[in-house]
Structure formats: structure tokens, C-alpha cells
Image (spheres, grey):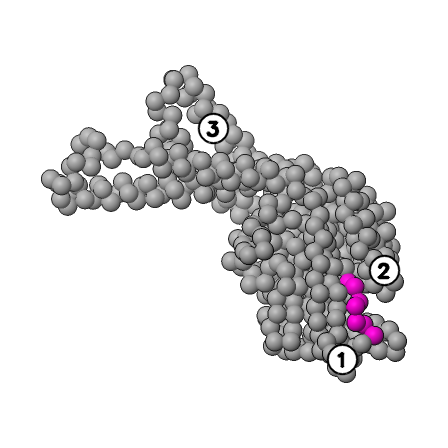
Amino acid sequence: MRNSGTWWIIAVIMLLLDLYVFQALRTVTQNSNERFRVAIHIGYWLVSAVTLLALLSFPYIQALQTSKLFRNYIFAILVGLFFAKLVGSVIFLTDDLRRGSLFLLSKVLPDSGARFLNDENAIPRSTFLSWLGLGLGGGLFGTLLYGFSNKYNYQVKKISLAFSNLPKAFNGLRIVHISDIHSGSFQNKNAVNRGVEMVLQQQADLVLFTGDLVNDRADEMKEYMDVFSKVKAPMGVYSTLGNHDYGDYVSWPSPQAKKENLDRLKTVHANLGWRLLMNEHVLLEKDKQQIALLGIENWGAKGRFPKYGKMQEAYPGTEKIPFKILMSHDPSHWDAEVKPLYSDIDLMLAGHTHGMQFGIENPYFKWSPVQWMYRQWAGLYEEGKQKLYVNRGFGFIGYPGRVGILPEITVIELRSEA
């Protein structure tokens, strides 16, 4: 019953939103045929009741917590309904503020304010604003449903990065960066396999994975071992852990069970042929020149995300290496620790945000609600000589779809400036 109190609070908020939205629904249906109006009202409350029941059942029923159908689709629909009603409620609140202002005006200036009243006691709701709120909320919900079709729509993004201190031997090095696989969410193995084939088609020298291989449990990878074990590169495949890999978001029968799960996940990386970097570094050599690749455990500066990473263990031994790449799952690590304390980290690779799987991107404009929490949330960021690239994620979690922010395979070419 992990965080069951939180779910009750969410359910109460949802019920209050239901009551508020229903007032607008009554307004737009007031002139409808009585049978139609009753059917719409009953249907609305049936959906609301099922929603509340599902929310309240989730923390108590283990089968719901492990069910892909519930976690991928039913839960996402519930969240979609919540935000759709929230958006509508903002418009309804505008209408209520209008009504309240007119009511006060009628009390302060009874003669002038009287003309705003339809009768002696009430200022009616605006049918237009009610329709607007319901339309915007319904439009948002419809967009989220459409996004279900985009979750395996992998996009290859190519970027060339120049560094004055990159050893000449590594000029033209091709890195494929992937992140946030979240294998526990997948339900279409053929689609995932197509994504992996796209990774292989990039013919990378080096593949780097920046965490969240699973949602919670190591056995989520069982069905996909044969798919991801195909990911190979001449200079190797290296990986790190993300916040979901530790199993922090589920209830375990004992601390030992949680530890064993993490141990199994480490074995999964090894069985894939991936070198998992746990607060350590490796030196990559080519033509007798070297660069350093550092990988740390999850370290997040935002919210309650854990700080398992230890740069003080990964960094020593790289001081004299001319060029350094850091794999760190959470991009907030860059501002909080990497830039102020490790100014010679040339390139940091991260993931974690997924771009919230929802937003707008075009050549001129990029926006997602996730930017209200993360300064760096998708794509390339530069400050001085240091660079950060945030991958938008290969997989998905929570919401089984993508709207605007599509799943990403990043190809990074390193160039040595003359």
C-alpha cells in the first residue's frame, strides 16, 4: 500500500474537479432533450466513478501495479482525464471570476449592476466559456489518445560536436546515445526490434546508454534480451543506471529482495554484453591516444530523485586525460555538480526527462511542461567549453504514447577543431 494516502488525496481532488466540470456540462446541456441530457449526465458520472475506483484500488491491488494494460493504458487514460478536466476547470474558473465580479458590482452599484443580472438572485454561467472549457479539455484528451500511436515512432537525430581538445585519433568518432528503454512498458516486440535495427544501421563506433533499462524489476527484460543483445559496437557498449533501475517505486517484501533485484539487473547488463559503469571510468584508446569515459549511478538534484552517483569515485585517474565524456542519467546533475566542480568534463550525456513525452518541437520553437522543472530537458546545451546532450528516451513510462516529443536515437559525431 505504498503512498496510499497520496492516492486518496488525488482521488479527492479528482472528485472536486468532477463536480466543478459537471456544472459546465449542465450549462451546455440545459436546452437539450431531457432523455439525451439524462443520458449524458449518467454517462459522465459512470466514467467518473470508474476513474475514482481505479485510482483508489491501485495502491492496494498488486496485480494492478504489475499489469501492463493498467499501467500503460488505463492509468494513462485516467491521467489524461485528470488533466483534461483541470484544463477545462481553468476556463470555468475564469467564468466564475466573471460572475463573481458582476455580483459584487451589482451590490456596490445596484442601479448600474442590475442590468447584468438575468434575475434577482443569479448571474448565469457563460455557455460560450463552458463550451470552450469542455472543448479544450476534450481536445487535450483526444490528443493524448492520438499519441498512443507514436510510442514506437523512433527518430534518428544526428549532431556534430567540435572540441579543440579532442585527440586527433578520435576525430570523426560516431557515438550512438540511447536512454530510458523502460522495457517493462513495451508490448510490441516487433516494433522495439525495428528500433534496435535503426540503432545498428547507424554503424556507431561506440554505443552509450544512460539509464532506466527497466521500470522497476529486472525480469522486465526477460522477453527483450534477444533484441537488445544485438546492440554492439567496435569500441563497446557502455551503460549506467537510472532512477527506475533501483526498484525504488514499488513495495518489496524485504530490503534483501530489493537488493537481489538490483543485482539481477546488473547481471542483465552483463548478459547483454554491455559494460555497466558504477561510479567508475574507462579509458578508450585509439592510435595511442586516449579519452576518458565516466559513468555514475543516478544523481538527481530535482524533487526526491536519489543521489546514488559518486563523481568522487569515478573521476580520479582521469585528471590528465585530455578529453572526458560523462554518462549521468539525470540532466540536473550538470548544473548542480558537474559544471561547478568538474569543469573539464567536456561532454555529458543524460536522459531521464523523456521531454515529458508531450510538447512541441520544430526548427524554431521547443516547448514542454517538463521545462518548468528542468532547465535542460531535450537536445543540446552548451556553456563555455562544456556541452550536455539530453536524449528524449527510447521507451516510455506512465503515458504509453508520444505527442510532439518522439522517441529518440541520437548519433553524435565528435570533431577535432584545428
Q: In the visual, does 398 lie left or right of 95? A: right
Quarter holding residue 54? top right
Residue 7 in the image: state x and y as whole percent. 54, 44
Instruction: Please report whichever mark, 1 or 3, sits nearer to the chain's N-terminal start.
Output: 3
Q: Nearer the viewer, residue 228 or 418?
A: 418
Residue range corresponding to the magenta coloring? 169-175
Which residue type does callout 2 highlight?
A: Ala
User: Which residue bears the numbered disc 1?
Assistant: 322
The residue drawn where x is 61% and y is 50% is: 405
Q: Amino acid at mark 1?
A: Pro
Q: Are marks 1 and 3 in contact (CB under 8 Å)?
A: no
Q: Quadrant of the N terminus?
A: top right
- Residue 326 position (above or below residue 41): below
Query: Mark 3 sits on what residue?
Result: 44
* Pointer 1 or 2: first along the chain: 2
What count of labels does the image hold?
3
Q: Amino acid at mark 3?
A: Tyr
- Dot 1 falls on a residue whose secondary structure is loop
